Image (cartoon, rainbow, N blue to C red):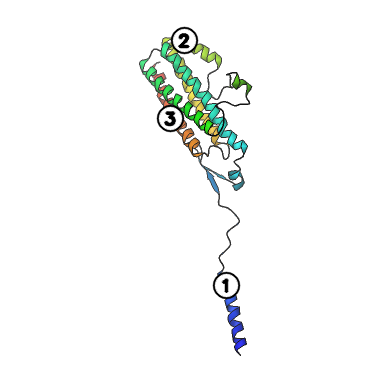
Amino acid sequence: MALRSVVPVLLSLSTVLAFGQPAKPSAKPAPIVQPGAPGKAPKTLSPAAATRRTAKVAEADVTFMQGMIHHHAQAVEMVDLLRTRGERKDLLAFGERITISQSDEIQFMKDWLAERGKPAAPAHDHAAHMGAMPLMPGMLTAEQMSALAKAKGAEFDRLFLTGMIQHHIGALVMVEDLFNIPGAGQDPVLYDFATDIDNTQRAEIEIMRRMLKESR
């Protein structure tokens, strides 16, 4: 009798233990959301895409910084011309703010690259060694820079404003292109920096458009 009474108890206990086991975690991982470029919706990435920060993705971040150094350097060069060839005092003051901020950003980008063991210009790019990296989006061509260097007074101011607006719009394109690469731009420091470039240059474009309208 004792043995027969124990068996049902053991069976009941085993049933409770079996059903009381915690559920196994789902094999399907949660979706991973990649922040979008400023003004753009975030993207949902597959786990494979999110974890695949391969050399290609790392290269996209590095290429962005190297290209933006080259891009900023031309803006500084344009302001150098403004100092001796421009006419408007308000434009000169505005240009000085551009060159101060972009010179600081150039140093920041060089430091970011150096911390990651990367050069300020593509090491494999022969043109970079010769000081002639390809033009980034919005950069003035050699012909445009030559025309700017030859102009003076009101004509210079007009060319400077139209050229710098074009230049700033190119920077926005570079930021958007970066964030369009799945997984790129996710370094927190780089993300904040690229977003700040986008916000700042959008605001400066509006200022320059007003200046250009006033000069007509």
Q: Earlier in the sequence, mark 1 or mark 3?
A: 1
Q: Label 3 amino acid?
A: Thr
Q: Is residue 176 above or below residue 44?
A: above
Q: Are marks 2 and 1 in contact (CB under 8 Å)?
A: no
Camera-nearest label, 2 or 1: 1
Q: Pointer 3: what residue?
A: 200
Q: Pointer 1: what residue?
A: 17
* Residue 151: mark: 2
Q: Position of residue 141 (x, y in %)?
A: 55, 17
Camera-nearest label, 1 or 3: 1
Q: Is residue 160 above or below residue 38?
A: above
- Name the residue: 53% across, 45% down: 33
- Name the residue: 59% across, 71% down: 18
Element type where label 1 sits in the image: helix
Q: Label 2 amino acid?
A: Ala
Q: Are marks 1 and 3 in contact (CB under 8 Å)?
A: no
Q: Nearer the viewer, residue 208 or 182?
A: 182
Looking at the rendering, in which quadrant would you find the C terminus?
top left
Q: Is residue 42 above or below residue 88?
A: below
Q: Position of residue 15 (x, y in %)?
A: 59, 75
- Name the residue: 45% across, 14% down: 81
